[in-house]
Amino acid sequence: NRDRPTCIPQAVLEAQAIAAAKEKKKLERDLENENGGAGVYSASLKKHYLLANDEWKEDILPEILDGHNVADFLDPDILERCEELEREEGLRLEEEAAQDAFMVDGHDELTEEQREILGKIRKKKAMFIQEHRMKKSTAESRPIVPRKHDKDRKFTTKRLGRQLTSMGVDPTAAVNRLRSQSRGRKRERSLSRADGDAMDVDGQHSDKKLRTRSRSRSKSRPIEEVVPGEGLRDTAQKKKAIKKSRDSVKNRNKEARRGEADRVIPTLKPKHLFSGKRGIGKTSRR
């Protein structure tokens, strides 16, 4: 029998030597065992802080009182700053008093005509403020009335033209646009009225016209087109939703069962439950 001793490669021996030379990292369990064990040792959370200087980790934090940092209110020059603020406040009050005195003296120097104009201006300003407050107080309860229901005729093209002219804007384009829109609406109403008359004269012809119009309208917007506000992402998702809705009612429609859109007349007091005498054993069922 030949001796076959273990052969460890040199690279492995070098790696083992390097690993043995390294210091083993102390874990929290090791620190706990060194400092009194469980229940005595309290792990420090500050040593994991990411600060510019590691020496700051164990610094004592400033005290907090009523949500405020006390250190922010400590100022050695607080008395001097208070005196500066008092001086500034005194100067500001003096300036305001001088300005008020100038205003009062200025009113005495006004002529009779200027005083009358000043009174009108103040009166109009007070009226504007009062009107604004009334609008603001009743804004939530006041209904929004469309301009087409404007009975007082406050919103007219003439008034629009005057306002734009006073602002220095040429009102021709805006007035022409409004008039063209109103003409278009009148033309639509006249066409619909003419269609109604034709329907009375020739019902079959008008039915064909209505069918072709509805068909053209349906062609203009396919059912798969996503309308804003439907909550669908794209056409594919809408197609999938339509298919699911149709599949869900297919079996019910085949069996002619009652659906969610059918009228329901409930029997509030069924006859078999509310007629006859109750026997000894019928209390639970009647």
Image (cartoon, rainbow, N blue to C red):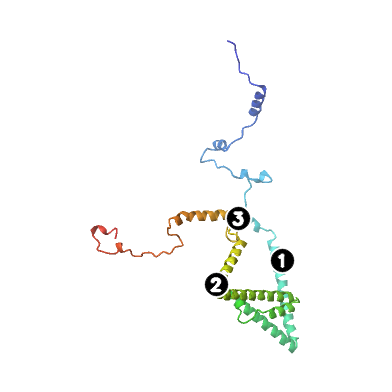
Q: Position of residue 153 (x, y in %)?
A: 63, 81
Q: Secondary structure at mark 2?
A: helix
Which of 184/273 is in front? 184
Which of 76/104 is in front? 104
Q: Residue furthest bottom?
A: 112
**Image quadrant of residue 98?**
bottom right
Q: State how far apart marks 3 and 2 are (Cα).
A: 38 Å
Viewer-side label of 1, 2? 2
Kind of residue at disc 3: Thr
Q: Residue at x 56, y 35 (%)?
A: 30
Above or below — where is 127 with respect to 92? Answer: below
Badge 2 local density, few (<14 within 10 Å), some, or many (20+)? few
- Residue 235's disc number: 3
Q: Secondary structure at mark 3?
A: helix
Q: Is residue 138 left or right of residue 78?
A: left
Kind of residue at disc 2: Gly
Q: State how far apart marks 1 and 3 are (Cα).
A: 70 Å
Q: State the residue position of label 1.
A: 84
Q: State the residue position of label 2.
A: 203
Q: Position of residue 241 (x, y in %)?
A: 54, 55
Kind of residue at disc 1: Glu
Which of 2/184 is in front? 184
Q: State how far apart marks 1 and 2 are (Cα).
A: 94 Å
Q: Position of residue 226 (x, y in %)?
A: 60, 58
**Image quadrant of residue 85?**
bottom right
Is the Cβ of the residue at disc 1 closer than 8 Å to that at disc 3? no
